[in-house]
Image: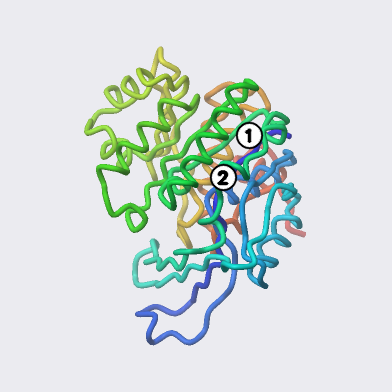
Amino acid sequence: MDLVTLGEALVVFSTNEKGPLRFINNFNKSMGGAEANVAIALARLGFKTGWISRLGDDEFGNYILFNLKGEGVDVSEVTFDSNNSTAILFKEQYQSNNPNVYYYRKNSAFTTLTPQHINENYIARAKFLHLTGITPALTEEAKSACFTAINYAKAHNLTISFDPNLRFKLWPDLNLAKQTMIEFAKCCDIIFPGLDEAQLILGLNSLEEICAKFHSYGCKIVVIKLGDQGCAYSNGDTIVKISAYKVEHIIDTAGAGDGFAAGFIAGMLDDKPLDECAKLANAIGAMAVLVKGDNAGYPTWRNLDAFMGKSIQRSR
């Protein structure tokens, strides 16, 4: 396979109406989950991806599994828990493009994941292992499972990518969050923090300081997400900024960072120069915000080339 990832997927209930959830009666159902999003985005580009997880032995678990199967993601390492439910999430929309989210994932099926659920032979088949900071925030056992996967990846010479993906509602202890993010940074080859995340984790402000610090931890490539300004990357020698693709009307920001990471990894899997990897990342991140839903906006290569101006897409 090209990439293996592990993490929790959730059934997402969102609404087109604005206001407090207590006044909302109608919801749309979809699925989300940072690591699953990356697997889906790469699968749509034709890469072979695998997702390790646990789901409740319930209709929501089946819904997530069928969605991932339909996207072409390998789910052979997904196991079911008959005693705990699949996690769910509600989105509450006001005027901002960033919704308020309410998690219902305590004691979910995924919280029973342990290092014993990580199959070394499965990871050994891949080129990349991708992790995020969401999984270690859920349980100590999930954090240990991540480090087990990292050890297997290192033993088999995989490239390890990491997106801090800080979720403050999952980290009641911010100092523990910072410490954990640094632990993971010291194990990865590529890191994808947002600028605000990097500043918070490291207590540094400038791109130069941030990149230098992550490189000192052993990260070979540091990619900083700069929102509507695009991104900056460093290979240890120089810092390069790549401009964003202009988006006139943002619909939903959920999943944009996961699409960004998938775009950069796609470029690396195709042995493209880092400039091109960053452009792909910016493009998929931009396309993600044009569509409602965590992963509905991720493109195929044909859609992506048209968006980037590399081809003409005829509508009729």
Confirm or deny contact between disc 2 and disc 1 (CB under 8 A): yes
- Look at the numbered disc 1 and give the secondary structure of its residue: helix
The spot of residue 245 in percent (x, y) is 49, 43
The spot of residue 46 in percent (x, y) is 75, 41
Q: Residue at x 62, y 20 (%)?
A: 157
Q: Residue at x 44, y 80 (%)?
A: 17
Taking 174 as reference, is 102 left or right?
Answer: right
196 relative to 10, above or below: above
Badge 1 density bin: few <14, some 14–19, many ≥20, Cα 10 Å:
many
259 relative to 57, above or below: above
Q: Amino acid at mark 1?
A: Ala
Residue for badge 2: 284
Q: Which mark is residue 51?
A: none
Quadrant location of residue 9?
bottom right
Q: Amino acid at mark 2?
A: Ile
In this rendered view, identify the residue nearer to me: 277 or 248: 277
In this rendered view, identify the residue nearer to me: 236 or 187: 187
